Image (cartoon, coloured by chain):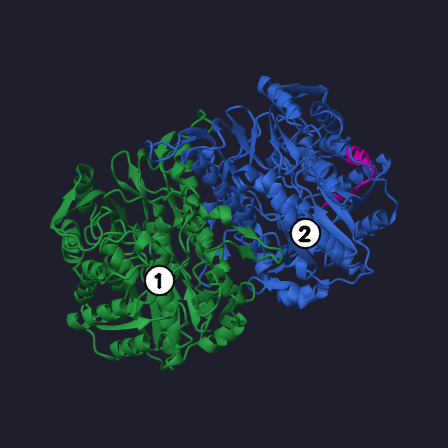
Chain colours: A green, B blue
Amino acid sequence: MSENKVLTDLEIAQKAAILPIGEIAERAGINADAVEPYGRYKAKIDPARLRLPTDKTAGKVVLVSAMSPTPAGEGKSTTTVGLADSLARAGHKVMIALREPSLGPILGMKGGATGGGYSQVLPMDEINLHFTGDFHAITSANNALMALVDNHIFQGNELNIDPRRMTFKRVLDMNDRSLREVIIGLGGPAQGVPRQDSFDITAASEIMAVFCLATDVDDLRDRVGRITVGYSHDRRPVTVADLGVQGALTMLLKDALKPNLVQSIAGTPAIVHGGPFANIAHGCNSLIATRTAQQLADIVVTEAGFGADLGAEKYMDIKARIADVAPSAVVVVATVRALKMHGGVPKDQLKQPNVEALAAGVGNLKRHVHNVEKFGITPVVAINKFATDTPEELEWLLAWCAREGVQAAVADVWGRGGGGDGGDELAAKVAAAVAAPSDFRHLYPLNLSVEDKIRTIVQEIYGADGVEFSVPALKRLADIEKNGWGGMPVCMAKTQYSFTDDASQLGAPKGFTIHVRDLIPKTGAGFIVALTGAVMTMPGLPKEPAAMRMDVDAHGNPVGLF
Amino acid sequence: MSENKVLTDLEIAQKAAILPIGEIAERAGINADAVEPYGRYKAKIDPARLRLPTDKTAGKVVLVSAMSPTPAGEGKSTTTVGLADSLARAGHKVMIALREPSLGPILGMKGGATGGGYSQVLPMDEINLHFTGDFHAITSANNALMALVDNHIFQGNELNIDPRRMTFKRVLDMNDRSLREVIIGLGGPAQGVPRQDSFDITAASEIMAVFCLATDVDDLRDRVGRITVGYSHDRRPVTVADLGVQGALTMLLKDALKPNLVQSIAGTPAIVHGGPFANIAHGCNSLIATRTAQQLADIVVTEAGFGADLGAEKYMDIKARIADVAPSAVVVVATVRALKMHGGVPKDQLKQPNVEALAAGVGNLKRHVHNVEKFGITPVVAINKFATDTPEELEWLLAWCAREGVQAAVADVWGRGGGGDGGDELAAKVAAAVAAPSDFRHLYPLNLSVEDKIRTIVQEIYGADGVEFSVPALKRLADIEKNGWGGMPVCMAKTQYSFTDDASQLGAPKGFTIHVRDLIPKTGAGFIVALTGAVMTMPGLPKEPAAMRMDVDAHGNPVGLF
């Protein structure tokens, strides 16, 4: 990084050489008639047309997770892309499998989900904006369902749906706090039936979860049909199949369900598909994408959202129960900056060397590392290097990892790119971990009660003393058992910033309780969402939204997008 | 049509031979680097990369309009496609320019906007579903704006916006009557500022209007910046430019703004782009699409929504004021069935021959035909043939046209296709009309007051005695003049089924008054919307929505889509 001016991620992406998507498909071993181009640099892969060598074994999965994220940035997507590029550079047949970014946070304040520096997937601007329209299809299917439900109630309500007991909500892919609590159906008898309602962000939609967990179109239709939209006046669950519209919703989703092919700056084939958030949803890319990548490559580098307490736990206990996508290796991304923040340093003082703060904050990393071991996998720690990190800090952290008995490597994939040598050491350690035998296991068996599943997660993974259920949550627990849904895994909804349900408790807190305020059975996705603390399923915008800096230049290119 | 089983439009479309979109682009004279494929059979055309012969004069525009539509179906899109195919068959260099269908009505009950029978644009299923995502981009931009506005109010409201005087609304591309009147921002101080609100369908969004009237990206940004979102507590209009987010919204729209290229069953190049409804919006495809087609072809066949009282009037008085897209010929589509319905025959008895009812209903056609003459153009009547029409009925109608002094032809483009000989006679008459000199003029000059512009339209076009403004509408009239907006044209929002503002008054009613209940200044689009009667800007679903018949078959193809 010797430039006078540090380029933004967008500038780096726009200057990068990019190959026609047909060449990337060929490099990935995808037959041309299974490729549906979307512009010059994006394509959908039609799994039904994919012709594969019959003797290929499924690729091994490397799951990239992280310590608890901070506003300082931990660079998990960057490391995912850079690691894959470095593995490719070492001669492995690799594919990247990422989630699709959500538009709402992009207009607010968050960086994109396409990596950074010289470890990005391209075309980053298109991926971060509308991409191939998958989020829009999911939003449409979700809102079509709710229009059909409210229309059913309006037109005579044959199913006897109780408008006060709806559990399914409308969504927008937008950070729009004004829609968190609304009343709809006002205006008199011609305009509907008034009821209290709420909008979620699209990433939290059960349609998104179903989309990401379906094994094919038929499984998608079945799962959509099993979604519970609410309850009847006599407390029976009402499903999409009861309304008879699972076919129409499947039709709205069928093209979106095809995985999206793009490339990294270094030219590594990447599938970017599905995009639930890991704090309020299960936080993993689509199962179809992961499996398609496994069919094509020997190593698939994927990520799960936020820290290992959220995305990775859900990957292991939800996604990896549906199909054989269990990781052969797990990477936990850490940064000196984030560890110092967990050690008590304010964001504006992170540039100052501070080994003491590092030592004070490393407990956060320690808990994540040992949590991963509970799934039978010894993780590799990737120290994502920032320009302000000092050699003393990096050495201290490497020495700490050695003392803890975990492999670790400093990766400079942001600055030098995975296509350069910035990730060679990390790639070597990860390749060794992939080759080594592993002993994957889920954290809990499905035959535990929902209450005990939650207790297991909060005690084993979060480090809590226990869990406290609100009065409504206790009532839901009883309903869940009564309806025969107790055998599903649990999807915790919790702040990503802390092991606790309070975003301000950094580091590795002890002696706390997790508060479950509500439980939502997602019978299509096949899990129970446990809402903890004050976690929101519809974010808001900040006082100075990023949107105010965005525009299009004279050449038609976006500006101000990161 | 000698088959034992009459095929549905979807079945005909799915059986039709379809060319790779690159071949259609070549046929249309589009250089390959201006083509961005979306799948195999759709593409976006980048106007900035289009290389055109410098000596080509702009193509002539044929505007296809219709008599007042009925549930019996008038086949305007079918005639547009079939006419273009027939003109191509006669050796003309032709392009079709249609609007994009809206998803909401498709899930409800309406046929698609892609034509029917053997006069369709392909791939009809993809065009009728998500297509290239333009509606989704418009929905996103619209709702991003409203999230930003409500966030501005929440974060301190520097612009002093009065939450009770918002004029801009959120939208969904959905028929969702429950969202017509809502209260948002409930839940306490952390969730926003409570206010009364409303959702429109995307086709009614001012972003859609701006999108369809913009001449290029810079004009789009300027227009978006001029949109009025509401008023301050001291009654000043608050614009998007005041909020500083016109750049971000332009960024969300920039790719959608590129026209979409598809093909008819006969292989005629077609641009399908933009999709406002003609009853609640201006009802014309995008100006950029029309002009791009004019640059490429000698004759552009386009349509304007619903009857000539709505879409055609708006084409002439709104769209044709912005750029030179004035039609050289106008086609008014009529059907024996629809005329009989206007003559008093119920829908279930339309198959019975009934010349008397035809004579009773022809007044509707007569008013439309003579309305078109008020714009300086003598129309051609296209009689869109149905299998149940008798020779006597068709002959009576042709004789009537002759008596009225208008050219007319029976077109069997549904059954035989424009690529066959079904539209040859119509094409010959339209080609003659295009070649003849015309004397296009707007209905009213812009320096009339808004009140007088509305009066002119309702008296000259609808045949009303006059107009009655509600008390709120009178107040708005005064505000409009005060804010200096009186020079804009008017976009009437009125039921499409009647010349009156009462959908049940068929035929050619006389002695009625049009009731203007509200006026909405669309300062970005550059027109004033006049809401009449009970017209709704958010439709509802019927008791048995079409969605209940839809699904995906084992080959991944949609079923039940028409």
B533 or A352: nearer the viewer = A352
CA gap between label 2 and label 1 equals 42 Å
Q: Chain of mark 1?
A: A
Q: Which residue is mark 2?
A: B289
Q: Say which amino acid is labelled 1.
A: Gly
Question: Residue at the spot x=55%, y=24% of the render?
Answer: B235
Magenta-drawn stretch contains B537: no
Q: Residue at x 30, y 59 (%)?
A: A352
Q: Are marks 2 and 1 on the same chain?
A: no
Q: Quadrant of the N terminus of chain A?
A: bottom left
Residue B239 x/y as whole percent:
56, 35
- At 38% across and 82% down in the image, what residue appears? A91
Which residue is farthest top?
A: B471
Residue on which disc 1 sits? A75
Q: Is residue A215 left or right of residue B461?
A: left
Q: Is residue B382 magenta?
A: yes
Q: Residue furthest right?
A: B437
> Amino acid type of disc 2?
Ala
List x then y, in percent, for residue B245: 53, 43
Depth order, front residue of B259/B311: B259
Give the magenta range. B369-384
Figure check: B51 above or below A251: below
Quadrant position of residue B29: bottom right
